[in-house]
Every structure is written in C-alpha cells, then in structure tokens.
Image: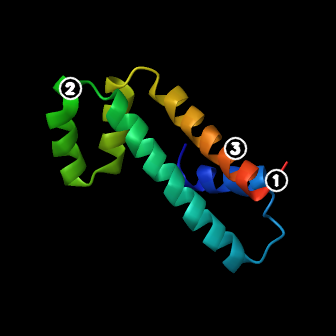
C-alpha cells in the first residue's frame, strides 16, 4: 500500500471526507504518524537478526522502493503484517474517537 492508498483508506474508514481539507490533513498527519510508528515496531520485531545489518545499509540510503522490496523478501507475510497493523491502528483510533 502506498501513501496515497493509505490516506484514502484512512479517510474512508474514519469518515472524514466531508471535513475541510485542513482538518483532514491534521487527522491524517496524526493517525498516519501513529501507523508509521507501529509499522516500524512491527517490522523491527519481525526482522530476522541476520538481516539487520542489511536493513541498516538500505535504510541509510533513503531508497524507499529498495527498502520495501527488502522487507517483502525478508519478513515472512510482510504484506499481511502491514495490513494487520494498519487495520489495528485505525480500529483503535475509531474506538478512542467513538466512531462506529
């Protein structure tokens, strides 16, 4: 899932499409930040020890495409882990915000 897809998912799931763009942006920034933090933790937790030095090299290069490929090839069920983490974070936000 790329960033634009993530934004659209958040907008749809929490029902903020009718809010002013500035309000949407604030919510997307905060919730998106939480998603990125939780994804980072999930990835690091599931990254095999022997792959950590390679991860550091790729991460330092700033090449997001290469990093995504590395995760897909290194972490079992990476896509499912990503989707699960996004879903859990959005669901948690909805619960806290009282959104059904």
Residue at image position (47%, 45%) is: 38
Position of residue 38 relative to residue 52, above or below, is below
Taking depth in this image into account, of 49 and 72 the one nearest to the observer is 49
Q: Is residue 69 visible?
A: no
Q: Which residue is mark 2?
A: 49
Q: Residues within 10 Å of mark 1 (few under 14, many from 20)?
A: few
Query: What is the C-alpha distance between the residues marked 3 and 1?
Result: 9 Å
User: What coloring was used for the rendering?
Assistant: rainbow
Query: What is the C-alpha distance between the residues marked 2 and 3?
Result: 31 Å
Give the mark nearest the N terminus, 3 or 1. Answer: 3
Q: Farthest residue toward the top?
A: 76
Q: Is residue 83 visible?
A: yes
Is 63 displayed left or right of 10 in the figure?
left
Query: What is the C-alpha distance between the residues marked 2 and 1?
Result: 39 Å
Counting from the top left corner in percent of width and height, residue 52 is at: 19, 34
Counting from the top left corner in percent of width and height, residue 58 is at: 21, 44
Is 100 displayed left or right of 45 in the figure?
right
Q: Which residue is mark 3?
A: 91
Q: Are marks 2 and 1 in contact (CB under 8 Å)?
A: no
Counting from the top left corner in percent of width and height, residue 3 is at: 54, 54
Q: Mark 2 or 1, which is nearer the eye?
A: 1
Residue at image position (17%, 24%) is: 50
Q: Secondary structure at mark 2?
A: helix
Counting from the top left corner in percent of width and height, residue 7 is at: 63, 56
Position of residue 19 relative to residue 82, above or below, is below
Q: Which residue is mark 1?
A: 99
Give the mark nearest the N terminus, 2 or 1. Answer: 2
């Amino acid at each position: 899932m790329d960033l634009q897809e993530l934004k659209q998912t958040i907008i749809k799931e929490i029902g903020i499409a009718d809010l002013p763009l500035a309000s949407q942006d604030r919510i997307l920034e905060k919730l998106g930040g939480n998603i990125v933090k939780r994804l980072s933790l999930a990835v690091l937790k599931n990254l095999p020890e022997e792959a950590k030095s390679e991860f550091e090299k790729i991460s330092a290069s700033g090449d997001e495409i290469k990093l995504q490929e590395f995760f897909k090839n290194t972490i079992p069920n990476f896509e499912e882990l990503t989707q699960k983490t996004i879903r859990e974070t959005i669901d948690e936000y909805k619960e806290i915000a009282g959104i059904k």
